[in-house]
Image (cartoon, rainbow, N blue to C red):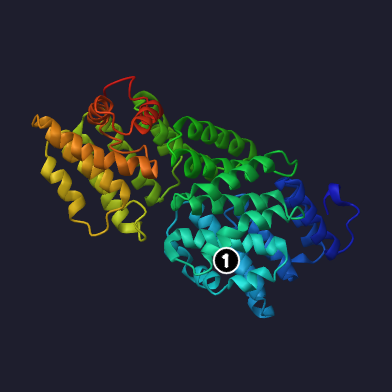
Amino acid sequence: MTSQSVNIQSAKEAGLAVTRAWMLGDLSLVEARLQDWVVLGGEKEVEYWVQRVYADACLERSTLSVSVRKAEQLAKTAGDEVALARIAAAVIDALYSDWYSSRDARQWLDVLRGVAYARLLALPAPQRLAIAAGILAADLFGEALASAAQVAASIGEWTEASSEVSATVRGNALGYALEYFSGQRNWAPAHAIVDRIDQLHAEAGFGDVAKARISARRGFYYHYRRGDYAGALEQSQRAVAFALRGGVSRAAREAGITVTLCHLMRGEVDLAGKALDVEERSIPDGHLMLRANVHYERSWWLALQRDVVGAQRELDTACRLFAQIDEHGVMSLATPSMQAQLLLQVGEYAAARRVFEMRTRRPDAWLVDMALIESQEALAEGDIRRATSALRGGLLIAARIDIKGCLWACRRELMQLLELAQQHDIESAWVDSTIRARLLGVDRS
């Protein structure tokens, strides 16, 4: 028994002490209390192993798979479906947030698919919020869980009414809800979630590991996706600092990717190159998804320097790796757009448009890029009337969905088009805000 816990005399007291440690946000104390529980016979209890799984997942321990097997065995023996759902939520959370394939979690995805919204409502708040985070992670994996929309809509209310739940659990649930609404570009509930996240930061029990995770997620899914690259950089750099203090690396890797993306989006080639090097060194051995992502980002980095041959080589490597592991097509929108932009740089306008036209699904962001490519082609031919017509149609969509990340690898071409938009008074507010956010007036790279 640890020196900090001389008054703990029973397994029940040890379990309550673990809960109190979670409330304090002190994961080293959680570890100590779990050890107390072992001494007092905790390894025979389902709840001990569920808590062990949570701790291993949060602290990124290599023992997670062992803890999961033992927790699963006891939960199945006891017929405890709620415990199985809690284990599933922790496993899915760990795999999703570390960019692993959902095929590694097929069994646990099936468990969460069977959790109905009505069943969640009947659970105590700590269990409900932990499972809710797992359901949203599973949905974001591309599994389209039936309960996800209701769960996401309820997270704010549930966290607001659950001060007895650790800030770690509440923060994780809020982070997944934020990502869910970000994916839909549904910013009203996202704003409300960010307000609640700000309140969590003021709580003493919101520890460094929890802060690292929420700051990394907020940096990309709230600030970056809204074109607030300065805000995304600030949140991501904070996430790295919190992760270092908390002794974890997953959130630092996630935030590091956003740091790279922000520098790339703002045309900061030297800073992006340094961030890419840091990102590449942090990739765990054998992690193909993160390796593929670095090749994609390096393609972008080279494209900013107008090295189309080098950029194409990196993009080809990225696509080959993504084809092996990206089963839900996470990068299926970004890689074709990058290909089209490389073609745009060498004046192959028709080929650039065909990259998009070959796809039956064309999201709004693609419609913007297609219009900009058509406008650039007309501008190159000296047809100002057709250029402004295509530009007007494309920027109408861009302003409506407020997307600032169009033609990210073609700053020179984009700035030419935005100058044309300024001359013809096309979507002036959006144009001005995009120039500021992307630092487009600084250079013509």
Q: Quadrant of the N terminus?
A: bottom right
Q: Is residue 146 visible?
A: yes
Q: Residue at x 68, y 54 (%)?
A: 159
Q: Nearer the viewer, residue 180 or 394?
A: 394
Q: Residue at x 55, y 54 (%)?
A: 177
For the image, the number of numbered tags is: 1
Which structural element holds mark 1?
helix
Tell whether 271 sits left or right of 251.
left
Q: Nearer the viewer, residue 391 or 360?
A: 391
The image position of residue 339, as x and y in percent, is 22, 44
Q: Residue furthest left?
A: 381
Q: Residue at x 50, y 68 (%)?
A: 109
The image position of residue 223, as x and y in percent, is 49, 38
Q: Which residue is mark 1?
A: 88
Tell whether 230 sits left or right of 7.
left
Q: Nearer the viewer, residue 173 or 96?
A: 173
In the displayed structure, would residue 439 be above or below residue 283? above
Q: Residue at x 32, y 44 (%)?
A: 397
